[in-house]
Amino acid sequence: MSNSAQNLTSRRRFLGLGGLALGGLAVGPTLLAACGSDSSGSSNSNNGGITMLNWPLYIEGDEPSTSPTLKGFTNSTGIKVAYKNSIDGNESFNTKYQATLENGKGIGADIIVLTSWNAAAYIGANLVQPFDIAAFPNKKNVISRLANPSWDPGRASSIPWAVGQTGLAYWPDKVGGKITDVNTIFDPKFKGKVTVLDELRDTVGLTMLGMGNNPSTGTVSQMLAAVDKIGKARDAGQFKKVTGNSYTEDLALGDTWIAVAWSGDIAQLQADKPGLEWVIPSQGGMLWVDNAMIPVGAKNVEGANKFLNYIYDPAVAGPLYESISYIPPVTGATQYMTATAQASPFIVPPATPPLFEFDVVSADVAEEISRAFVAATEQ
Amino acid sequence: MTAAAAPSRFRRPRRDRGGDDTGVSARRWFTPWLLIAPGGLWLLVFFIIPLFSLGRLSLENGGLSNYSMVISDNSTVIIRTFVYATISTIAAIIIGYPLAYVIATKGGKYKNLLLALVVLPFFVTYLVRTLSWKILLFDGGPVVSILHSLGILSESQGILGSPFAVVAALTYNFLPFMVLPIYVSLEKLDRRLLDAAADLYSSPARAFRKITLPLSLPGLFAGTLLTFIPAAGDFVNSELLGSERTVMIGNIIEKNFGKEFFRPELSALSFMLMAIILIGVIIYARLLGTEEIA
């Protein structure tokens, strides 16, 4: 008797577990949506303050509340900043928030940060609002090469928050010396030991440079030719992986010998792995810009302008960008950095080789290239 | 004791149905619906409705041509996905069945401890378990160095990034889902049937084939589903331990669902995955003859 009762419970318990697992599968997508609404709900409690959504590692330290920059701003203006490291990708951000913004509703954020191609789309669709120059006079401090993009003349409604580089990271002991040529990633000698990024603007841009084309001004057919080259190399087994953030794991382990890499990641990896080398290839590297903007429906527009004004004070920007190891977009900020930071290629890249920002192409062209890139790198 | 309890369970409801007045019967009629309401509502809101909207999305832009397009574009990946899922399920049966058998029949007082050990890896998050394989299997790691020194792998060969790494990790990650249902079905098996077989001069092997195996089929069937279905939809193992040669359907969906113009095709791909699994399960159920579950 006791035996059969035990069987019954264990079976029932097991079936319950199965149900739980199935429930978890079904609820996955809605969890995403729940995360989206979470941040809009909590901002209401932030009376008189501002809410900023940003990418991870774009402010000092792991815990934003301890950031000297945020503390300094609150001390000098009395405005509190609810700062959230909640943006993990342009596409996932669009999935969460774009529809709400298109309905003209706020998303509970006063400042958002998006990469140029996506920022351009937001400006084109009027999902963000222009800055208030009276509250943001320091806007004039933006470095000249980023001061006047075609998609936002005069930086009317977007301002660079972080500027990073895409180049190559490699192990000199494994590849047998220094690397300067971007085409090394296609060298059959390193077959299966190379990773490239699944962000097409980085990988396609570098490949275009290797083919002698300019990614900032190149034609669609030049872009597609680069995609084709990447696809053929992948089919030949040249690439260990075409991947996103996770490339750093294999690189740190030494399984990857050469990686198309983001400067911020390598700045951090080198702290643990001094043997790892970073290079902007002789043909040039890629530059990417994440831009701060004030979305429609922001509750504290004035506070948001004031905050960006505070960041664009060179004396504030200097220590901030030294701490996060990105190129400061603020003129004069390097004067407020230590000599070590001024010598860092991650913060102050040398004038040559040049850095190129990938052309902000129209939505149709972006889709065409994106489709070609997915077809070339995933099937 | 067991045998005596079982028939009474079957008899009781029949007796109840015979003698009831109308008030009780109304309540009787109502109760099961009330009990399934929370689960039913949950499934409606979080399963049926999303499934329906996904189905509609899969027909946007191109209609049914989305389906033919995803099949022709991804045929290699689709085949690879099901090959991986099938191999890891078979491997889980080969490893899991003897394990469940020993725990159920020879476990004795250690039964619960052994079961706990099977479930123990679940106390560590899936992601960390899989990532730790990376540290174990990388080119400079312990496993590869041993295999190199034994000459099993040549110096240029590694494990990380190979189909072997992905299939092995799939097997490992879903193994408990195979062991537990098989264990349950073996544990409730009436030992006296085996005694009877022995009394009738059956060899142990024959008794296993004629009694134990057929009676454990429901568990084997449930275990196969619980292993095969998540393995076919998995992307974590291939993403973390695989390479460009081990891309599975889940990877393509996971990477591209953010791109708005891809969603109809990816929804079609998801439905394809579901349809293939469903057809596979029906065929499998027919072959195994476990109508009670299918």
Image: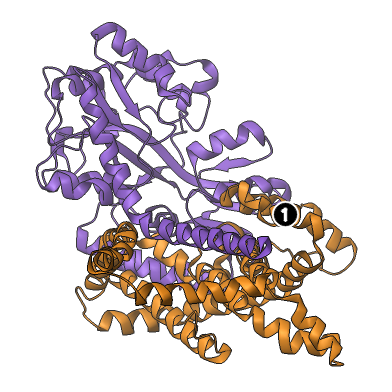
Chain colours: A purple, B orange
Q: Is residue A133 above or below residue B69?
A: above
Residue for badge 1: B112
Q: In this orientation, which residue lies closer to the viewer: A62 or B93? A: B93
Residue at the (62%, 81%) spot, across then down: B217
For the image, the number of numbered tags is: 1
Q: In this orientation, which residue lies closer to the viewer: B108 or A294? A: B108
Q: In this orientation, which residue lies closer to the viewer: A91 or B47? A: B47
Q: Is residue B25 left or right of residue A300?
A: right
Residue farthest to the right?
B150
Residue A46: x %, y % from top left = 24, 21
Q: Is residue A237 left or right of residue B47?
A: right
Residue at the (61%, 59%) spot, across then down: B241
Q: Is residue A218 above or below residue B97?
A: above
- Asked whether residue B180 is in view, the answer is yes
Residue B94: x %, y % from top left = 72, 75
Residue B147: x %, y % from top left = 84, 63
Report crowding for label 1: few under 14, some 14 to 19, many 20 or more residues within 10 A (C-alpha).
Answer: few
- Residue B272 is drawn in which quadrant? bottom left
Give the letter of the chain under mark 1: B
Q: Quadrant of the N terminus of chain B?
A: bottom right
- Residue A198 is drawn in which quadrant? bottom left
**What amino acid type should be assigned to the residue bearing mark 1?**
Asn
Residue at the (24%, 9%) spot, across then down: A77
Residue A209: x %, y % from top left = 42, 55
| Mark 1, secondary structure of its residue | helix
Residue at the (47%, 50%) spot, across then down: A283
- Asked whether residue B162 is in view, the answer is no
Q: Is residue A191 left or right of residue A32?
A: right
Q: Is residue B183 above or below residue A84?
A: below
